[in-house]
Image (spheres, rainbow, N blue to C red):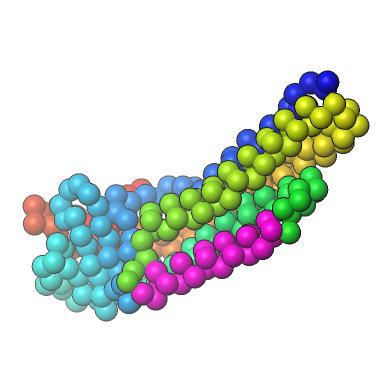
Amino acid sequence: MPRPRIALLALACLLGSSVASATSVRTDDCDIDSDYGLRLHGGVIELTRDEGTPKTIRIDQGRLWLDGAEQTLNAADQRRIARIEEQIDAVVPEVRGIAIDAAAIAIQSIVHVAHVLGNENARDAKARAERIEKQFVSKLDEQLAGPGWDEAGLEAEIESLVADMAADFASEIAGLAVKAALSGDEKMAEDIEARAAQLEKVIESQVEERARMLEARARKLCPRLEAIAELDDALEVRTADGKPLDLVRR
C-alpha cells in the first residue's frame, strides 16, 4: 500500500492560504491608517468607530456632522471637506476593482486545481466559481448603490464566500489523498501525487505574482490617501473636546 500522499495535503492547505493572500491586499505601504470604518450611503460618506469621540463623522456636499450635530465650518474648511469628499469618491471605484480581482485570484486557483487533478466535479467547480464571482460583484454594487458600503463587512463577505468554496475543494483534495493511499494502485497514486506537487508550485507562484500586481495597484492610491491626510491635518474644525478630527493617521 502506498504511503500517505503529502503533496495533496499540502495543496489542500495552500488553497486555504491562497484565499487569505489574495483577499488581503491593503494600502499599508502608504503609511496611512484610520481608526474609522467607511460606509457610503447614496453619496453620503460616513466614518464610524466603536471607541472615542466622535464615533460617527458624516460628510455630504462639503458639510460635516459629528455624532449627528452639523458643524459650522469656515470657508477654508468647507473647501477642505469638499476635497476630502472628492478624494474618497475617486478612491472607491478603484478599491471596488481591486476587491473583485483579488477574489477572482483565489476562485480561479481553486477551479484550476479541480480541473488539473481530474476532479469529477471540475465542471461544477467552474460553474460554482462563476456564481460566486457574480455574487461578489452583485454584493459590492448593491452596497455601493444601496443602503451603504461597509468596508469591513464587505471584506469579511468576500473572504467567507471564497473560504467556503476553498474548504469544499480542500476536503475533496484530502479525500483524493486518502483514496490514493487505500486503493493499492501505486501508479494512480504516483500520478495524482506528481500533479499535486506541480500544482502546489504553480498555484503558489500565480497567487503571489497576481497579489503583487494588486498591491502595486493599491499603492497607486497612496497619493490620494496622502492628499486626504494633508487636508485632514489642515482642518481647523475641532471635536467637542477640542481635538483635531484625525480622520486618518500617518
Q: Is residue 244 left or right of residue 218?
A: left
Query: Within the magenta stretch, is there residue 143?
Result: yes
From where the camera sits, is residue 27 visible? no
Q: Position of residue 242 (x, y in %)?
A: 10, 54
Q: Is residue 205 left or right of residue 191?
A: left
Q: Is residue 14 left or right of residue 189?
A: left
Q: Position of residue 9 (x, y in %)?
A: 69, 32
Relative height, residue 47 to residue 160 (above, below): below
Range shown magenta? 124-146
- Picture quarter with the N terminus: top right
Residue at left offset 52%, top offset 65%: 135
Q: To which quarter of the image does residue 72 belong?
A: bottom left
Q: To which quarter of the image does residue 234 belong?
A: bottom left
Query: Within the magenta stretch, is there residue 240?
Result: no
SS majority, magenta: helix
Q: To which quarter of the image does residue 107 belong?
A: bottom right
Residue at left offset 42%, top offset 58%: 154
Number of marks drawn:
0
Residue at left offset 58%, top offset 50%: 165
Q: Position of residue 200 (x, y in %)?
A: 74, 38
Most extreme residue toward the right is 187
Q: Position of residue 243 (x, y in %)?
A: 15, 52
Residue sitting nearer the eye, 62 or 118:
118
Residue sitting nearer the eye, 135 or 64:
135
Relative height, residue 4 to residue 119 (above, below): above
